[in-house]
Amino acid sequence: MKPIWFAVAAALAAFVWWRRRRLEPPLMIGLGLVAIGAAVYGTGLIEMPDFEQVLTDVGEALGTWTYLLVALLCFLESGAGIGLLVPGETAIVVGGVVAGQGQIDIVLLIAIAWVTAVAGDLTSFFIGRKLGRAFLVKHGPRVKIDEHRIEQVEAFYAKHGGKAVFLGRFVGLVRAVSPFVAGSSGMRTRRFLPYDVLAAGIMVTFFCLLGYLFWRSIDRVLEIARQGTFALGVVITVVVAIVVAVRWLRVERNREQLDAFLDAQEGKPAIGPVVRFVRAFGRRLVGPARFLWNRLTPGQLGLELTSLLAIAAVGSFVFFGYLIVLDPITELTPGDERGVRWSADLHAAWLTEAAKVVTHLGALPVAGGALVLVAAVLLWRREWLEGLALLAGLVITYAGVHITKAATDRPRPLQPLVETAGSAYPSGHAAYAVFWVAIAIALRRAFPGLASRAIVLTAGIAIAVAVGLSRIYLRVHWFSDVAGGWGLASTTLALTGMVALVVGFFTSGRARLEPEPEPPVLGPR
């Protein structure tokens, strides 16, 4: 017996009976059948199939045909509204698991899932564009959506449609209908597409890599995916509610009504002390909350801090993710095995000599020495915070590398092409090579123009990548060691940079001199 399903059946039956004179016959019959099905399922006589297990079994059996399975479900999720019944992230995670087993390629999987997800969204978008508004005007009143509400939605998408499309991609039920609503509201394609492509790419890549990295524990992966999606949906809902509340409080009349209501409540013996405490706490919270909002959104130092926070999040995910995956630490990932094969296939005397030269760019005396030199120049120029941030990043990265090596004691690949010793994870050379990226960012003011700065930054990234690849080619590190080194250094340097930005903001006087911009407002004015 499953009482909750009896409760669902009873609630649906009561709703149908209450609205029997207003519901159309097809909808009434459909809801009645759902209520009957819920009641039968509640008896325990019929068990619904475990769709996630079905997807897992099908994915393992299909092999390379998993590409087609993931592509179809990614397309149908929003293109046909299937996401209302089956979360698309489940299919994407299963595809990542199959890639982790070595049956398909993870990069091609991400590309296919990304393209088909966007194609499904565009299909739903153009369906909404074609018959959306007329459909909503005709059928909306049955679910309390009148023409005035439709006009509000259209105004909202005209002002905040990009954010709605982006955030809606990460909330299961919203993901299935958001493109249709965007199309029916008259949102332009050139505005819809960039947000949708970016959001779909982030979502698809995250869930593919989640399955790829944790492929040995499919049940755990799917549980993480469900919990993560639910948590993100809750966070987005809370943030939207806060923004709507802020917008409501910006109206003086609304604030007066709220103050009058709270004044009346303070006089009540039961809840008066609680109301007084909440009001006092709220006044103290306004300043820090406004500061945090402006730090995580464009304006003042917001964009820089948000970018560093994103780098730290990705870097820590990679670093700690491999620590969790490599359990026991002697296990190899598909990327590790592929790196060994790649090294054997490309082996050549001239390439080995070139790799030995490149790999020295990631040695601590070279990369660390260059970072110390740049930090010294910054300190000499009285740019104290940037110089100290670089030095702190170097020290913390060095400590993190050696502490992790001692804790993991992971064996290195067999038959290395250069002499080496010590634990493999993480790669110190790969971590120190990220210093070149930090150097390129620190020297940005020395190069006039966006193009020259982009070239310097690209060169720093290229050196970091080349050093990492050289470690894999020389068979002194596994791919996971290199990725972990990149992740560790990215995290530590981003965190020290964030500290420098915040300290500099307060000590420079900008926090007092620059007015705080109002938080963004949702909905039409």
Image (spheres, grey):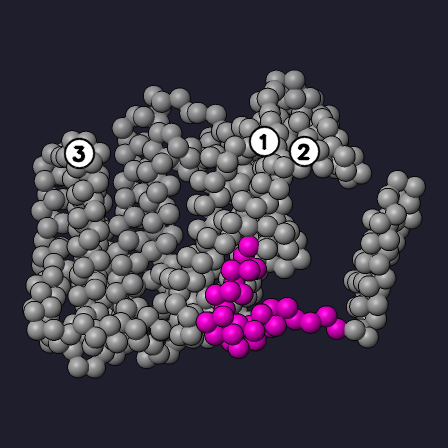
Circles 2 and 1: CB atoms closer than 8 Å = yes
Q: What residue type is labelled 1?
A: Gly
Q: Does the magenta stretch include residue 61?
A: yes
Residue on which disc 1 sits: 186
Q: Residue at x 44, y 40 (%)?
A: 194
Residue under the point 34% across and 49% down = 311
- Residue displayed at 35% across by 40% down: 305
The mark lying in front, picked from 3 and 1, is 1
Image quarter hosting the C terminus:
top right
Q: Name the residue under label 3.
A: 445
Confirm whether residue 171 shows in the render: no
Kind of residue indicated by mark 3:
Arg
Q: Which residue occupies the foreground of this view, 430 or 93? A: 93
First of labels 2, 1 by sequence position: 2
Q: Which residue lies most toward the top here? A: 253
Q: Vertical placement of 519 versus 211: above or below?
A: above
Q: Give the range drawn in magenta.
A: 47-75
Q: Position of residue 472 (x, y in %)?
A: 21, 69
Q: What residue type is labelled 2?
A: Arg
Viewer-side residue, 92 vs 514? 92
For label 2, the residue is: 133
Distance of mark 3 from mark 2, alpha carbons? Answer: 51 Å
Q: How far apart are marks 3 and 1 (CA)?
A: 43 Å
Numbered disc 3: secondary structure: helix
Secondary structure state at the residue bearing disc 2: helix
Q: Nearer the viewer, mark 3 or mark 2?
A: 2
Image position, residue 383 (x, y; %): 17, 35
Q: Do the residues labelled 3 and 1 touch (CB within 8 Å)?
A: no
Would residue 129 be visible to someone looking at this image? yes
